[in-house]
Amino acid sequence: MPGSRTGRPPVQRASKRPAAARPPRDNPLRTLYVRARKAWDRPLTAYYLILGGSLLITVLGLVMVYSASQITALQLSLPGSYFFRKQFLAACIGGVLLFVASRMPVRLHRALAYPMLAGSVFLMILVQVPGIGVAVNGNQNWISVGGPFQLQPSEFGKLALVLWGADLLARKQDKRLLTQWKHMLVPLVPVAFMLLGLIMLGGDMGTAIILTAILFGLLWLSGAPTRLFGGVLSIAVTLGFILIKTSPNRMGRLACIGATDPGPNDQCWQAVHGIYALASGGLFGSGLGASVEKWGQLPEAHTDFIFAVTGEELGLAGTLSVLALFAALGYAGIRVAGRTEDPFVRYAAGGVTTWITAQAVINVGAVLGLLPIAGVPLPLFSYGGSALLPTMFAIGLLIAFARDDPAARAALAMRQPRFGRKRAAVRGSAGAAGPRRWNTMRRCASAARSSGER
């Protein structure tokens, strides 16, 4: 081996080892998707979506009702918080109804179907009695219950149709009668048309459209054939066309779809100013309470057009948040209806989901200028105790059905160990092994000492 210049042997360099192959990194987006999919498929997902989504919508609705109704209340020489206090009282009562409905067994919900239907029909008849019924904005669909409080029986008719229709179809499915078209239509369609007639006597076509949507949802869930479904739909469309054609007010509302100018006699004033409110909101809005359109320019700012005020004050972010909450609520309702084996639960959950989703679509579509103004409130969000109470009871129905799922029931049982049970179990194990040592530091110090040391 030749020496180096210094006379020292050359240093032997170790050969480089081949680098170990690194494991491929997971795509973060795919990892997030997998985790979200697992969380989405958990048994309690629908339960938490219904409970959390409905409560968030209600709370945000209370905030927006307070903001949007102050000017209207002051113009009527009322305290600024007048409408908010009434809505808050209705929300408290509705919260009690929601809790009661969520804890009621399914058989009790079915038992309420016929009494609720009979009570709703009786109240709708009372609306047409002179001296009892009250007309609001040209529609006589209200009953005065004393003082400033009024009741709209047609709102309870929606809940009655859902419960009664679900119970009727479930009984017929148990007897295998839904394969015959006459059992699918009778008496469901005649009773629904009776309710529609009582509502249309007062001129409230918006509520009639929601009731028709509930009827179609129940027929679709029961497996109605296309010809039967199309026949009922054609009859409803024909009657709706006649009712719209014979009413100048409804024809004027139909002409305001997509309007950008109030038009002659300001017939599209409300629709146009709703668009103005949304357009001036921008991305994040002008700030809570800073709406300009609610100062007398936008009619019904705290009821039918509260979504426009939300867009003006909270911007695109606020409106998209409200729509996302309704989308989550609708998905959870469809999931409850699709995963159950109880026919009553499937029909009732599907009917409630159709009711809330259709009403939200009609309200938001009217505010956006995509649909005619139907005069229906945004569920859980707009001002109106008569609409809020049955809707919150219906949400309680969905919560009860979501809890009744076997997988959800098992998950809730695992997540609800009582503190007292835990403590009793610990006490029992300590009693079996000997007296329990409460001083943990003393126990650790005693274990560290030698056997002969005190």
Image (tube, rainbow, N blue to C red):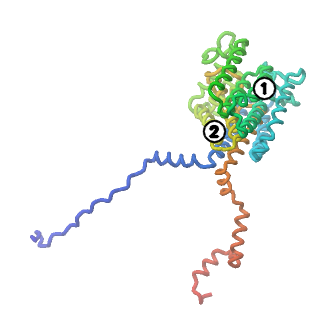
From the viewer's perspective, tell me whether residue 254 is left or right of residue 190.
Answer: left
- Callout count: 2
Q: Is residue 183 above or below residue 410?
A: above
Q: Position of residue 242 (x, y in %)?
A: 71, 14
Q: Residue furthest right?
A: 131
Split into 4 quadrants, where in the image is the N terminus?
bottom left
Task: Choose top left, top right, bottom left or bottom right for residue 152.
Answer: top right
Task: Choose top left, top right, bottom left or bottom right for residue 208.
Answer: top right
Q: Mark 1 points at which residue?
A: 195
Front residue of 349/225: it is: 225
CA–CA distance between discs 2 and 1?
26 Å
The answer to whether the residues at label 2 and label 1 have Cβ atoms under 8 Å apart is no
Q: Is residue 10 above or below residue 178?
A: below
Q: Which residue is drawn at 27% across and 60% down?
A: 18
How crowded pointer 1 is (Cα within 10 Å; few <14, some 14-19, many 20+) is rated as: many
Q: Which residue lies furthest to the top in this view?
A: 264
Say what amino acid the circle numbered 1 marks.
Leu
Front residue of 343/386: it is: 343
Say what amino acid the circle numbered 2 marks.
Ile
Q: Which residue is drawn at 62% across and 87% down?
A: 454
Front residue of 213/192: it is: 192
Q: Is mark 1 on a helix, strand or loop?
A: helix
| Residue 385 seen from this side | yes
- Label located before the other in sequence (2 or 1): 1
Q: Which residue lies furthest to the bottom in this view?
A: 452
How crowded pointer 2 is (Cα within 10 Å; few <14, some 14-19, many 20+) is rated as: some
Q: Name the residue under label 2.
A: 334
Q: Is residue 365 above or below residue 116?
A: above
Q: Where is residue 420 in the image (x, y as percent from the top left)?
A: 73, 63
